[in-house]
Every structure is written in structure tokens, then in C-alpha cells.
Amino acid sequence: MFKLPNKPFHTIQKFLIEHRPLVFRYLVKKIKFAIQHDVTRVELFELPNSQTTRHVAVVKEIDYEKVLQQAMDVCSEVEDYETAANARNTIRLYREKHITKLLNEIDTEE
């Protein structure tokens, strides 16, 4: 997780929009790690705020596939085919682990 500089939110928002391929490349890497290590949420970055409050942008496990699909789409548009392929492969990994988990639960019930 990286900490964003203490800038107005619209500046951060502008950065995230202007650098979407870079942001999605980071997301794919973080989500892939989370899937491989059975982490249920990914902390992406800490948003600047007062010293007493901590705001962190996260992606929950339930949203992994949707975010990876968005990464695949955005990276394909800008011809970053390597990241698009990584996103596609990470979706496959997610589905395989999810199916395996469901099958294990069925075996446990029997």
C-alpha cells in the first residue's frame, strides 16, 4: 500500500484518472498477490487526512473479478497487452481458487 501526498482530493482524483493504466497495473499485481495468499481484501492506498483518521482505499474479494475485468478492458484500450493478459490470467486463478474452495466445502459437508 502506498500513501498518497497530502493534496486536495480533486488532485488525487485527477491523477487516478489520468494514469488509469498505471493504477490498474498496480491493482492487478495487488489482487493477484491477495488471491495467491487467500487475502479477503486489498489495501491500495491511504488517502491523506487528519492525523487521527485513517482512510484507506480497498478492494474486497467479492469485487476482485470485476476490477480485474476493468483492468483488462482499460489496458487493452491503451495497448498494454501484457497487463491485460495478467488480468485475464488472474481472473482465471481467482475462478479456479473459488471453485476449489466451493468443492472443498461440499466435501466437508458430506
Image (tube, helix red, strand yellow):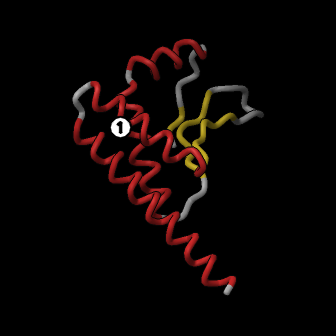
Task: Compare residues 22 and 93 and report the one nearer the observer.
Answer: 93
Instruction: Check disc 1: other Cα within 10 Å, few if <14, some if 14-19, many if 20+.
Output: many
Tell me which residue sits at (50%, 41%) in the image. 66
> In this rendering, is residue 102 above or below 110?
above
The image position of residue 32, as x and y in percent, is 42, 54
Quarter of the image with the C terminus is bottom right
Q: Under tag 1, what secondary structure?
A: helix
Task: Compare residues 104 and 56 and report the one nearer the observer.
Answer: 104
> In this rendering, is residue 28 above or below 106?
above
Q: Residue furthest right?
A: 52
Check disc 1 and report the residue beneath it.
72
State left or right for residue 42 relative to residue 91: right
Q: Which residue type carries mark 1? A: Met
> In this rendering, is residue 89 above or below 20?
below
Tell me which residue sits at (52%, 47%) in the image. 64
Quadrant position of residue 36: bottom left
Total numbered labels: 1
The image position of residue 81, as x and y in percent, is 22, 37
Task: Compare residues 54 and 93 and report the one nearer the observer.
Answer: 93
Tell me which residue sits at (58%, 22%) in the image. 6
Task: Compare residues 30 and 6 and report the one nearer the observer.
Answer: 30
The image position of residue 98, as x and y in percent, is 52, 63
